[in-house]
Amino acid sequence: MSEEEAKRAARPTRRQLQVQLADASWVAALLAVSSLALTLELRASKPAARSLIGALSVGFWVGGALAGLAALVMVLLGRSRRARRVWLPALTGVALCVTSLVVDAVVHGDRHVYLDPHGLPRVYRMRPAPRGESARGVLIYLHGAGGTEDQGLDPRLGGGTFARLFRELDARGWAYVCPRDAELDGLVAKLREEHEGAPLYLAGASMGGRQAFAACARAGHPFAGVILLCPAMNYQAKGQPPASLPATWLVCGDADTISTGPSRELAQDLSRRASPPGRYRELPGGDHGSPLREVDWGAALDLVAGGR
């Protein structure tokens, strides 16, 4: 064989180039889909979006595992040439899925699960007390309608209102908890187990404010204080607030058509009792979102903590 013939024989055939192109296409497609999934994972806040991303992640695992199994069978049957085409996408799929899980753990590693009194799993996110110290208090924030457990941990939301809250909590050595829903009995049991002796405080905005008020109006509740921001509740003045209502910080906007009336009624009742303390602030020109954006977290925390 001449040197020229040897060079021609060493060149990849058209079939080999097609195989290499197919392998490269597999990898490119998996990289594109995985990049999209990871981008969505970083941005998703709605449960439906997270479910879709979770299904896609499972699809990576299942697809990669099946392709790997098929490659192993082909190797055992002596068809290694075909198996080579399956191994690459299989391993790539598994590697990308592992990457997705690692990113998810980094982004949402503060998610926790507890069981409610009926044995159903419930999800919450937690921001521990600073420097690993024992929490001197625990604030539970209930999100508004359409929100998730992510709302109260978004430092950009409401003009940075939660970033300001984080600084106040750190200064006091408090932990901070954001549950996905307003099931509180199981959550309180979990927090009492993890933060023995630490007082519990409740806060909520809009629908979360209504839920926080309802929880604190119930006799025997465990909360030492409550912060109500534009609570979307129905309340009529009775001469006295509910006897079980703890120290209360209440804020609404005077242009808010949802919460202003009931908040004024509750404020009227709060003004008639000396203890525990109650404070009402009405924001001139404020809409339904103003209390969350403009709340004085430091003063609110001082009041509810001082009302123990």
Image (tube, helix red, strand yellow):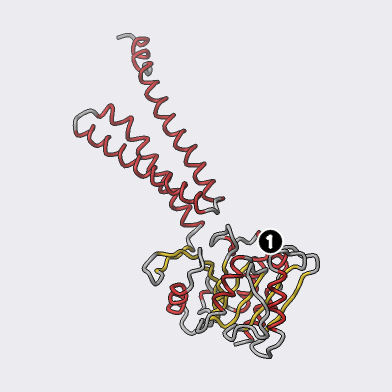
Give 42 or 55, whichever is nearer the viewer: 55
In the figure, 50 relative to 211: above or below? Answer: above
Residue picked out by circle 1: 158
Q: Is residue 112 left or right of residue 290?
A: left
Disc 1 packing (10 Å; few <14; some 14–19; many ≥20): some
In the figure, 266 relative to 42: above or below? Answer: below
Residue lying farthest right?
284
* Rendering coords of residue 158 (x, y %): 68, 61
| Quarter of the view holding residue 262 | bottom right
* Residue found 71% across the figure and 81% down from its top: 279
Give 220 or 163, whichever is nearer the viewer: 220
* Rendering coords of residue 239 (x, y %): 68, 85
- Quarter containing the N terminus: top left
In the figure, 126 relative to 20: above or below? Answer: below
| Quarter of the view holding residue 231 | bottom right
* Residue found 65% across the figure and 60% down from its top: 157
Can the viewer see residue 130?
no
Q: Is residue 98 left or right of residue 305?
A: left
Give amino acid for label 1.
Gly
* Residue found 28% across the figure and 27% down from its top: 82
Numbered marks: total: 1
